[in-house]
Amino acid sequence: MKLSFQSSEYLCRLTAGVNCKDICNRKSATTSDTVLTTKTAKTYDTPSEEEPGGVDMKTEIELRKRAIALHLQGRPKSEIARKLQRSRSWVQRWIGRYHPDEPTLSLQDQSRAPKQMSWVYPERIKTMVLRIRQERVKGQPAKYQYALVSAQAIYYELHELHVSPLPSPRTIHGWLKQADQIARRKSRKPPNPTYPRLPCKAVNDMQELDFKGPFYLQDHSHKYYLMALRDNRSKKTALRALASKSMDAILDFLVSAWQRMGCPKRLQMDNCLDFRGSNRHPRALSKLMRVCLDLRIQPVFIPLSEPWRNGVVENLNGLLDRFLFRTRTFETEKQLHQAVQRMETTINTTHRLPALNGKTPQEFAAHARLRYPPADYDWRTRDLQRVKGKVTFIRFVRKSGRITVTANDKFLIGKKYKWQYVMAIVDVAKKRLNILWQGKRIKSFDYR
């Protein structure tokens, strides 16, 4: 079998090899017709190694080596591409892959197999996840009465059950989303960058306090409230149902909680009168503030009408609504107190949180260095009129350049600070109000 010179030139183009004329000259006969022998033609018809598309692999490797050689000679990439009849991106790719320590190996084709194999989980695993989610939402059986419902919580349960293969929290979240068991979140406004971030790196650097309720016993009109205290770092929680919002009941709860959880450096709360005190005497310290200062705890009040600033304790609202207010009714006060106590224990000892690296609040705070009130501390017998310390109010500067600290107690900060946040810190001993903006004192007022 013989091929004409035109046919051999066409085959050379298909191989995308080196210069076609060189190949033809090496393989040509001495006759005037310049024909290829049958043996030569077979090397193109049945190559030993081929890339997809019929390109001779040996010739391809030689081309790559030739491209590297020309590059090392300083030839431009565009010129190399024209000379080798390849694209500029092809030249760039192999120049990038070339390694002088492994010149041949680095120019070989790399595996196109996925670097990570995607698991196809058995259907029984997915069914188990969806069933656990439904049982957790319903709170049935009894072990799920106060359980979390997130994908992370389900993951921790499967891990403790030694389920194999164990799906990741992201995979579980995807299954729940496919089953329409996860509601879409509303977009949030970007945070104001001037809001002061108080340090909270260790357990009890800051605790948050809030009221929940009111709620009622079955067939009763008396109001009950739930006091919630939560550590910002460890998420350890103290709860108590109160029959009134009296200051004495609040202080008894706080002192009892601090004797179990330890005293914080700061206690953050909203601006309700039960915490802040009287509008008639806006600069007078409330009894709660005085007890805090007596125990070397700094009270911190979040901006007016911004409850989300107490986010750690506000996050309990969904749990409390699902566990106590929406699904259960209580006939007696004893049942209510027992349920609240069980819920506190469950939150602290069974809720494994991603923020705590899968630990429970009790486990996370187990080895922390804590400061407790004196064992015999009784706020009723203390002289709370001579306390010293500081009280912090985080406030938003209005368009007029003013802030409202308490009630109608307003101070002019300056229009240059409008739409920004400042910290108004009351020095109780010196009776001064210092205004801090981004950590710098910008104003100081008499505060008597």
Image (cartoon, rainbow, N blue to C red):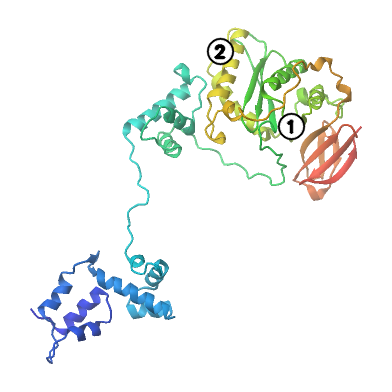
| Residue type marked 2 | Thr
The location of residue 82, given as percent across then percent down, is 36, 79
Q: Residue at x 50, y 19 (%)?
A: 145
**Lateral position of residue 270 relative to residue 82, left or right:** right
| Residue type marked 1 | Arg
The residue pinned by badge 2 equals 329
Mark pair 1, 2: CA separation: 35 Å
For label 1, count other residues whose C-alpha is less than 10 Å away and answer few (under 14), some (14-19) or many (20+). many
Q: Report the mark closest to the observer, 1 or 2.
A: 1
Q: Nearer the viewer, residue 334 or 111?
A: 111
Q: Which mark is residue 266?
A: 1
Q: Nearer the viewer, residue 36 or 176?
A: 36
The location of residue 140, given as percent across then percent down, is 45, 18
Disc 1 secondary structure class? strand
**Rendered-image quadrant of the C terminus:** top right
**Lateral position of residue 350 relative to residue 391, left or right:** left
The location of residue 263, given as percent across then percent down, is 72, 26
